[in-house]
Image (tube, rainbow, N blue to C red):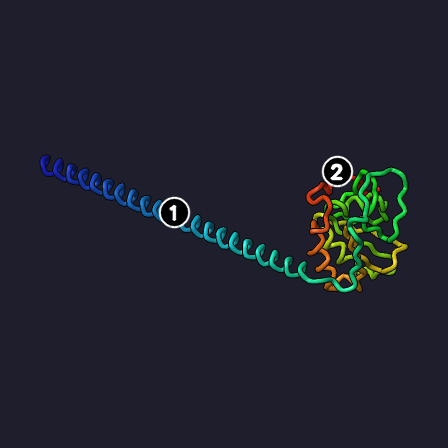
């Protein structure tokens, strides 16, 4: 009986050890499956993100190409009603004495040594002609309007200017047209913010071929007073 009892005890111990081994093997197997799943999921997520990033970059590049192509197309055409002054006759001296310009707003000529900040600046008040002309010399487009301009048009133009480096906008009460766009040696009166000539003028003259000093600074000059 004693022998049988010891045998049964030993058998139970062996069974317990076997069960423990099976549990450990099962736990290890399950852990391996979980780890493999996590690795696979992580790899899929990274791959998915990588592919999404690549798709976004491709989309952005395509959009940039389309935008540039559209800009070139707009810039290639003539602008109806545009006035042009001979660039050779537009002097470019830096002066501090007051300059009387033959056109309003001015599109060139001698000007103040300090430019008007023109990194998409929308001024609520009139700006000095002599500083604005210096901004035109750097390749900016200057949008001006009278108090007769509809508020909706002023808002849309301000939004466009705010998104466009090398542009500025300000009220100008004694100009001939309600809304006018000026660049160095170039000027046009438009019917409103949705006039297609607005997009043409920006495409053609923001840092355009007419610019005497392309790439010159549009920040670090005179700001709002």
Horizontal and vertical percent position of residue 50: 46, 50
* Mark 2 or mark 1, earlier in chain: 1
Q: Residue at x 38, y 47 (%)?
A: 38
Q: Which one is in front in this view, the residue at disc 2 or the one at disc 1?
A: 2
The residue shown at (77%, 39%) is 221
Q: Vertical placement of 22 versus 197: above or below? A: above
- Which quadrant, please, contains the N terminus? top left
Q: Neighbour class for label 2 at 10 Å: few (<14), some, many (≥20)? A: few
Helix, strand, or loop for circle 2?
loop
Q: Position of residue 188 (x, y in %)?
A: 79, 59
Q: Nearer the viewer, residue 225 or 46?
A: 225
Is disc 1 placed on a helix, strand or loop? helix
Q: CA distance from mark 2 to mark 1?
A: 53 Å
In the rendered image, residue 24, in percent from the top left (x then y), is placed at: 27, 41
Q: Disc number at residue 220?
A: 2
Q: Residue at x 72, y 53 (%)?
A: 205
Q: In this picture, is 60 found above or below 134?
A: below
Residues packed near mark 1 inside 10 Å, few (<14), some (14 to 19) or many (20 plus): few
Whether residue 142 appears in this view of the structure is no
Q: Which residue is mark 1?
A: 38
Say which mark, if any, is on residue 193: none
- Residue 136 visible (yes or no): yes
Left or right placement of residue 27 versus residue 115 in this view: left
For the C terminus, the quadrant is top right
- Residue 75 sits in quarter: bottom right
Question: Can you tell which quarter of the image residue 23 is in?
Answer: top left
The structure residue drawn at horizontal position 76% and vertical position 61%, both measured from the top left corner, is 193
| Closer to us: 8 or 103 | 103
Check whether the beta carbons of the residues at disc 2 and disc 1 lie within 8 A of each other: no
| Residue 138, image x, y percentages | 74, 45
């Amino acid at each position: 009986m004693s022998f049988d009892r010891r045998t049964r005890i030993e058998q139970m111990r062996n069974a317990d050890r076997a069960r423990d081994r099976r549990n450990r093997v099962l736990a290890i197997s399950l852990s391996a499956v979980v780890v493999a799943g996590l690795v696979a999921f992580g790899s899929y997520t990274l791959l998915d993100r990588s592919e999404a990033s690549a798709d976004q970059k491709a989309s952005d590049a395509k959009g940039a190409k389309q935008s540039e192509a559209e800009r070139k197309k707009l810039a290639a055409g003539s602008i109806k009603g545009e006035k042009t002054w001979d660039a050779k006759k537009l002097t470019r001296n830096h002066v501090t004495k007051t300059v009387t310009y033959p056109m309003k707003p001015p599109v060139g000529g001698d000007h103040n040594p300090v430019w008007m900040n023109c990194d998409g600046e929308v001024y609520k008040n009139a700006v000095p002609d002599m500083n604005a002309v210096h901004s035109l010399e750097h390749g900016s487009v200057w949008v001006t309007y009278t108090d007769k301009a509809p508020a909706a048009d002023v808002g849309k133009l301000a939004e466009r200017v705010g998104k466009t480096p090398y542009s500025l906008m300000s009220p100008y009460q004694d100009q001939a047209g309600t809304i006018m766009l000026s660049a160095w040696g170039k000027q046009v009166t438009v019917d409103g913010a949705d006039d297609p000539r607005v997009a043409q003028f920006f495409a053609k003259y923001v840092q355009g071929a007419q610019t005497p000093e392309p790439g010159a600074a549009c920040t670090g000059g005179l700001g709002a007073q």
